[in-house]
Amino acid sequence: MTKGSPLRLILSFSIPLFIGNLFQQLYSMVDTIVVGRFVGVEALAAVGSTSGFSFMVVGFAQGLTAGFSVIISQRFGAKDIPMIRKAYTMSILSSAVSSAAIALFFALLSMPLLKLIDTPENIIADANTYILIIYLGIGTAIFYNLFSSILRAVGDGRSPVYFLLIASALNIVLDLFFVIVVPLGCAGVAIATVIAQGLSAIVSFFYIRKRFPIFRFTRSDWKLDIRLCAHLMRIGLPGALQFSVCAIGVIIVQAAINGFGSDTVAAYSVGGKIESVITQFAPAIGMGISTFAGQNLGAGNLDRIRKGVRTSFAIMVAAAIIALIVALLFTDEFSYIFMDRETTSPQIIAMARQYVHTIAWFFIPLGMIFIFRTGCQGLGSGTIPLVSSITELVARAIAAFTLPIAFGYAGICFSSPFAWCMAAAILPFCYIQKMRSIEKAMGRR
C-alpha cells in the first residue's frame, strides 16, 4: 500500500473485500430466507426483529478486531516484525477475554432486551431462541473477524474471501439441514451460523500461520503485555463502540417498527436485508482506505494518504450511483427471494419496496461515513469514529421518535437517511483536523 497507484491498490483491495462482505451477509440472509420460505412469515419476522441486537454484537466484533489490526498495519508499514508478532498474540488474548464477557453479558439480558423494545408476543419466543444462540457463539464471529482483519492489514484481501465462500456454502447446507431435515426452526439457522463462522475462524488461523512467517509466534510472544493489551483496547474499543452505538440507533428504530405489528416487522426486515447487500460497497471501500492510511502513516507518507482519500471518495460516488440504480430496478425481485410469491401479502412487498427506495437516494452520505470514519481509525483515532457514531445515534433516535408520529411508516423509512446525513456532515472536517494534528506531531506544516 505504500507504493504504486492508489486507485489500483484500493480497488484491488476493496473489490475482494466487497465480495467477501456480500458472502458474509449470507450468514444472516440465508437464515431469513430459509425460515421465511420453510417456516413462515412469523419466523422471518422473529429473526428479523433481532437484527439490531445481532448488529450490535457482530458489529462490536468487527470494530474491535479492526482496531486491533490497525497496530499491525502500522507496524507492517514500518517493518517492525517483533512488534507485529507481539500485537498478534495479544490481539488473540484480548479477543478471547472479550468473547467471554460479551457472551455472558448479552445472554443474561437476551429476553429482557426483546421485551424492552416491545417485540410482538407471537414472535418473541423464536426471536429469543435465535439471538441467544448468536450471543453464545459470538466468539466465532470475533475470531473470524480478527484473522480476516489481520490478513487485510498486511495487504491480503483475497484469502478471507475464499474462506468465507466455503463457510457460506456450509451455512446454506446446515441451514437447510437444521430446518428441513432436523426441524429446529429459528434455533437451527442460528446454530448453522455459529458453526459456519467457527469454521472460517479456524481455517483463517492456520492459513495465517502457514502463509505468513511473521505471524509464527514463539512462547515468549505469549507473555502477557498489559501495556500493549491496553493500547490495543484503546484503539479497538472506540471502533467497537461506534458499531454498538449505531446498533442502538437501529434497535430504537426496531422498537418503533414493532409497534406496527409482525407484518411490518417482516417487511422492514426484508428491506433491511436488501439494504445490507446493496450497501456493502461502503464498508469495503472504508476498510481499503483504513489499511491504506495505516500503512502509509507507518511509512510517513501523508501526501499519499490524502491522495488515497480523494481516490476512495471518487470510487464511492460511482458505487453509490450503481447501488441506487440496482435498488430502484430490482427491489421486488430481491424481496421475493425471502418470501413466497403466491402466499405473501402484496402489502408486505410494498412496504419493503418503500423502505429500500427511500434510503437508496442517500447512499453517498452513507459512503462518506465509512471513508472518513474508518479512514480516521486507520490514522489511529478512536475518538473521531466514536463521536461520529454518537451523532448518528442521536439523529436516528430523534427521527425514530418524531417522524413516525407525523408520517407513519414513511417516517421510519427516513430515519436512517437522516442519521447518515448528520454523521456525514461532520466527518470531513474531523479528518482534516486529524491530518493537521499528525503533521504537527511529525514536525511538518
Image (spheres, rainbow, N blue to C red):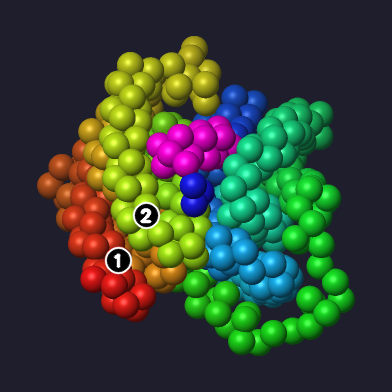
**Residue at the spot of label 2:** 305
Residue 382 rendering spot, x and y as whole percentages: 41, 71
Tell me if 220 is positioned left or right of 396 in this view. Answer: right
Q: Nearer the viewer, residue 6 or 445?
A: 445
Please identify the residue farthest to the top as the structure is shown.
342
Earlier in the chain: of badge 2 and badge 1, it is: 2
Residue in the foreground of this view, choosing between 34 and 421: 421
Q: Give the residue drawn at x 43%, y 16%.
A: 333
Q: Secondary structure at mark 1?
A: helix
Q: Residue at 36% of width from left, 60% of height from top?
A: 302
The residue lying at 79 percent from left, 77 percent from top is: 222
Name which quarter of the figure residue 365 lies in: top left
Q: Residues within 10 Å of mark 2 (few under 14, many from 20)?
A: many
- The residue sitting at 59% across, 25% down in the picture is 37
Query: Quick check: 115 left or right of 84?
Result: left
The local crowd at label 1, few if under 14, some if 14 to 19, many if 20 or more residues have their Cα within 10 Å, is some
Q: Main secondary structure of the magenta part?
A: helix
Q: Which range is magenta? A: 4-22
Percent coordinates x, y for residue 63 in the rendering: 51, 61
Mark 2: which secondary structure? helix
Q: Amino acid at mark 1?
A: Met
Quick one: 334 or 403, which is closer to the camera? 334
Disc 2 + disc 1, Cβ < 8 Å: yes
Residue type indicated by callout 2: Ile
In the depicted structure, whether residue 103 falls above or below residue 230: above
Circle on res. 435: 1
Query: How far across and how far down the image is residue 219, in percent?
Result: 87, 76
